[in-house]
Image (cartoon, rainbow, N blue to C red):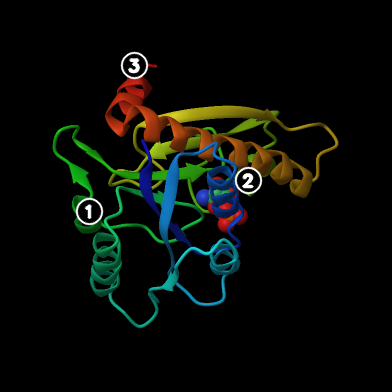
Amino acid sequence: MSIKLAVLVSGRGSNLRAILDAIASRQLDASVEVVIANRKNVGALDVAREHGVPAVVVESRALTKEQHEDKLVAELERRQVELVVLAGYMRVLSARFLNHFFDASTGLYSIVNIHPSYLPAFPGANAYEDAFNAGVTESGITVHLVDEQVDHGPILSQVKFARLPDDSLQSFKDRGLAVEHQLYPAVLQKIAHEGLQVVAKEAVKQ
Ligand code: GRF
């Protein structure tokens, strides 16, 4: 079964590109109905346009959180999105927003996020830097369902990667990003095929 996604972005869009490439090569049975950025001039909007996907800016500047999220919800509902995919989206979503994507049959929100650490280690906006500066010998990537807390919620999949002795921050990040680009499309494919409910239940069992 194919699933209708919306991807929310704030930055360069390398995960968005990985998702769109996986769809193009039929490794992911999904469609990206819309890519929404909260500011203009971000690389991810160009990635969307290159792939012929609607690229929309719902600017957060000058709006209250409530006003901004109301506009987001209107856009997402208009496009009949089934799963909201956060890919480098730098704003925290309110409980009010989450409730629009609440699935009463599972008690879950249909919103996924990718975070560049092995959660619960190193939540926050600078996870690569924080893990690297803490001197870890390995780190990881987490795909999880979103809940009311930041970088928190049922974990759908986690993969570890090594920090090598001669790593720079950049080479450490590059190794992690390569993992991100494999993991996110793979988890989305599992959701597309098995449904969020089944995938999340398995996650809870782990
Ligand atoms: C990724 O490292 C992702 O894990 C984090 O934000 C970064 C986004 O990168 N949430 P990109 O815009 O997908 O290239």
Query: In percent of the image, x 20 and y 45: which residue is there?
Result: 102
Mark 2 sits near ligand 1, with its Cβ under 8 Å away? yes
Mark 1 near ligand 1 (CB under 8 Å)?
no
Secondary structure at numbered mark 1: helix
Q: At label 2, which amino acid type do we have?
A: Tyr
Q: Is residue 95 visible?
A: yes
Residue 112 horizontal side relative to residue 104, left or right: right
Residue placed under numbered mark 2 in the picture: 128
Residue under the image location 82 percent in, 32 percent down:
165
| Label drawn at residue 205 | 3
Determine the image quadrant of residue 190. top left
Which residue occupies the foreground of this view, 56 or 101?
56
**Could you tell me residue 21's position as x and y percent?**
60, 48
Q: Position of residue 56 (x, y in %)?
A: 42, 71
Q: In the picture shown, does residue 92 fall above or below 41?
A: above
Q: Quadrant of the N terminus?
A: top left
Q: Which mark is residue 95?
A: 1
**In the image, 172: left or right of 128?**
right
Q: Is residue 55 above or below residue 51?
A: below
N-term mark: 1 or 3: 1
Q: CA distance from mark 2 to mark 3?
A: 28 Å
Residue at 65%, 48% (x, y): give it: 129
Relative depth, front residue between 180 and 150: 180
